[in-house]
Image (cartoon, rainbow, N blue to C red):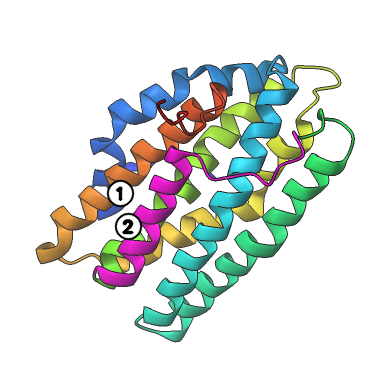
Amino acid sequence: MTTTPSSTAAASFTATAWERTAAVRGAVERCAFLAELADGTLAPAVFRHYLEQDALYLQGYARALALLAARAPDAGAAGFWARSAHGAAVVEASLHGDLLDGGLLPPGDGGVPVASPTTLGYVSHLVATAATAPYAVGAAAVLPCFWVYADAGRRLAARAGLVEGHPFARWVAAYDDPAFHTATATARDLVDAAARPELAEAMHEAFAVATRYEWMFWESAHRREGWPPLGG
């Protein structure tokens, strides 16, 4: 299965949204965090920072998915979003916890991790959109987290597989799992099913903002973004 839209889906909302975000997705492909993660040279302290922020992000993402489940137009869509919320809150969070506490990474600084400005902004965008915008717009907003990760995960897996003893192989494998790609395809189908002409531009905006946040999230993790100190 490929995460790139096929020619037969050229007229769908998701195919158009994917094409319209090509510049941002190109920036994702070029970002240093993913390049260093792929070849195994990413600093362990940077990966810890990323995992800590991603764990905080997943809490908010699960809330956004749960909101979509409650507002879904049918039982099938509601069930998918609810299962995805559970996966984000429990399954993925468990993987993060195992990686953070497994001895591979340097210890944390002892404090409770705080959401960075980028993490807080991304979560706020998703939760607010899922809660207050039309269902179709909320669905478009949560889709990039599936799709951009699946697309990046496939490339990461191909490159990381060439590195013997890759230190982050378990994390890379999780995002190139066939079940994750299947879930991504289902999410795309649900967004396309919800798309309406009168909502198209709002959906494109929600999708584009979330795609940009995907790029910003990796960029901010690479520089271990935190809140600036208060001025004296």
Picture quarter with the C terminus: top left
Task: State the image coordinates of residue 193 (x, y, percent, origin top left).
Answer: 31, 68
Label 1, on which residue? Answer: 207
Label 2, on which residue? Answer: 140
Viewer-closest of 65 and 128: 128
Q: Is residue 202 left or right of residue 229?
A: left
Residue 120 belongs to the span the image colors magenta: yes
Q: Residue at x 71, y 60 (%)?
A: 91
Q: Amino acid at mark 1?
A: Phe
Q: Is residue 101 above or below residue 28?
A: below
Q: Secondary structure at mark 2?
A: helix
Helix, strand or loop: magenta stretch: helix
The disc at residue 29 is none
Q: Amino acid at mark 2?
A: Ala
Badge 1 density bin: few <14, some 14–19, many ≥20, Cα 10 Å: many
Magenta-drawn segment: 109-133
Viewer-closest of 43 and 188: 43
Residue 11 appears in the rendering: no
Task: State the image coordinates of residue 176 (x, y, percent, origin top left).
Answer: 64, 41
Picture quarter with the N terminus: top right
Q: Is residue 39 above or below residue 199?
A: above
Give residue 224's quadrant in the image.
Answer: top right
Task: State the image coordinates of residue 129 (x, y, percent, origin top left).
Answer: 31, 62
Residues at discs 2 and 1 in contact (Cβ within 8 Å): yes
Q: Residue at x 78, y 38 (%)?
A: 170
**Hey, which residue is sitting farthest front in the picture?**
232
Viewer-closest of 96 and 226: 226
* Separation of marks 2 and 1 at Cα, in angstroms: 5 Å
Residue 221 belongs to the span the image colors magenta: no
Q: Is residue 146 above or below residue 38?
A: below
